[in-house]
Amino acid sequence: MGKSLLVLGSQWGDEGKGKITNFLSEKADIVIRYQGGNNAGHTIVFGGHKYALRLIPSGVFNENVKCVLANGMVINPRAFKEEVEEIRKAGFPAKNIYISDRAHVLFDHHIELDRLNEESLGSKKIGTTKRGIGPAYADKISRVGMRMCDFISNEFPELYKNLLTIKNKQIIDMGGNPIDYDKTVKEYLELADYIRPMVIDTVAMIGKARKEGKNILFEGAQGALLDVDFGSYPYVTSSNVTSGGTVDGTGIGCHGIDDILGIVKAYETRVGEGAFPTEQLNEVGDLIRERGHEYGTVTHRPRRTGFLDLPALKYSIQINSISYICLTLVDVLTGFDKVPVCTHYEYQGQLIDTLPASDRVLRECKPVYAYLDGWTEDISNIKTYDALPENVRKYVEFIEKETGTPVVMVSTGPDKNQTIIREEIF
Ligand code: GDP
Ligand code: IMO
Ligand code: MG
């Protein structure tokens, strides 16, 4: 019997999903992205090289792994081609890539509308990656989006013309730059030719793989606190990032995911706007940013930084049914005398440990901290859990106890080799 494991971001993204997916993909037959698009930026380091993936699953560096961009994704065909070519230039064949015929296509008009939406929001902007993600998902839900099965069909020029007529009206109304049909259709037809051989019925493929006992990895993008239903709305992305999104984003079915590995950064980061109770707008926050190289992979924006937020993590564990934790970037916390961890929020004189629905309320929540003893030893080359300094283990075990969830992996650096396995789960 094969195993299926979901690698899921449990905070605001950038927890190290790419690193861990690549690490685990050695044992996988298939790695599947199920939501989002090139708003994601997943960094992978091995063999002295660093790779940044946006759309392609992080199994692509293993020749035998099939990489699937499943139906829940929104895919910019130009960005897709560029990324595949980049990977090939780096010396990897990137041959086993499959795109769902049900996935939605992200066009230039989505990017223009993303820009216009953000501009019109002014100081209330979301702080999106400006990759057109929100408008692409809005079209999908409004039933005017274009799916891969139509993009690669002979109907495409006609369908695109009708679609662009409507979208250009919106763009002009908002004072933006309409998209030129003749210029773009030519490029998109070439991109459709490039993509056509990779477009298949991934629902059937994934179902068959599961029946045949293949090892399947699902690779989440973003983080649960950016989920459109469960995140600090409206400062969220436009897809279901949570484990539920895996079911709808692939067609695997509710019983198709055996275990869920929550990737948890040892502290918090957030890019874009929205409440962030433990944010450190001070030199400590700056130190974490510099040590952790906390700058966006996609937009290069400095990431906001803060201490670990247990109410948010416990919420994430609940809404995702997280079965195991992989704690990442623990090395970044080396050198602190005390490491604060938020255990509760204080809201209007009451202690709470749940996440309010309203971003406005969350902004008013004041973190209440437990202060754990820090460590000074360099942990970046330690290979076993038992060899970690006692205070690192105490930090890990505190998180375990508070969340009731076993920490099975500890990551101590960006390189694939800097990964400590406490319990094999895949
Ligand atoms: P993702 O979006 O979840 O895949 O994460 P990103 O790649 O956007 O951001 C994580 C950053 O931390 C990347 O630069 C990784 O190379 C790096 N990284 C991952 N794990 C570790 C770790 O344990 N320690 C350190 N120092 N860096 C890490
Ligand atoms: P990975 O997969 C961190 C954030 C944006 C913004 C909000 C909405 O690398 O963890 P969008 O462009 O999706 O409409 O932006 O979501 N965001 C991410 N933050 N990591 C990501 O992906 C993100 N993808 C989107 O910064 O706040
Ligand atoms: Mg990232």
Image (cartoon, grey):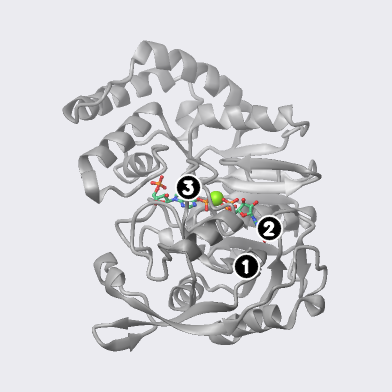
Front residue (pair 12, 266)? 266
Q: Give how far apart the Cα atoms at labels 2 and 3 are.
A: 18 Å
Q: Label 3 sits on what residue type?
A: Gly
Circle 3 SS class? loop
Residue receiving disc 1: 261
Query: Reading the chain from its start, which is encountered first: label 3 or label 1?
Result: 3
Q: Of tags 2 and 3, which is closer to the observer? A: 2
Query: Reading the chain from its start, which is encountered first: label 2 or label 1?
Result: 2
Disc 3 under 8 Å from ligand 2? The reply is yes
Counting from the top left corner in percent of width and height, residue 174 is at 19, 31
Q: Give how far apart the Cα atoms at labels 2 and 1 are.
A: 10 Å
Front residue (pair 259, 343)? 343
Q: Is residue 147 left or right of residue 219?
A: left
Q: Label 1 sits on what residue type?
A: Leu
Residue receiving disc 2: 20
State the quadrant of the N terminus.
Answer: bottom right
Asked whether residue 244 appears in the rendered view, the answer is: no
Q: Which residue appears at 27% of the width and 28% of the height?
A: 167
Query: Reading the chain from its start, which is encountered first: label 2 or label 3?
Result: 2
Counting from the top left corner in percent of width and height, residue 243 is at 51, 64
Front residue (pair 371, 38)? 371
Circle 1 SS class? strand
Q: Label 2 sits on what residue type?
A: Ile
Residue receiving disc 3: 36
Contact between labelled residues 1 and 2, with CB atoms less than 8 Å apart: yes
Circle 2 SS class? helix
Where residue 414 sits, quadrant-wise, is bottom right
State the quadrant of the C terminus.
Answer: bottom right
Where residue 64 sits, quadrant-wise, is top right
Disc 2 under 8 Å from ligand 1? The reply is yes
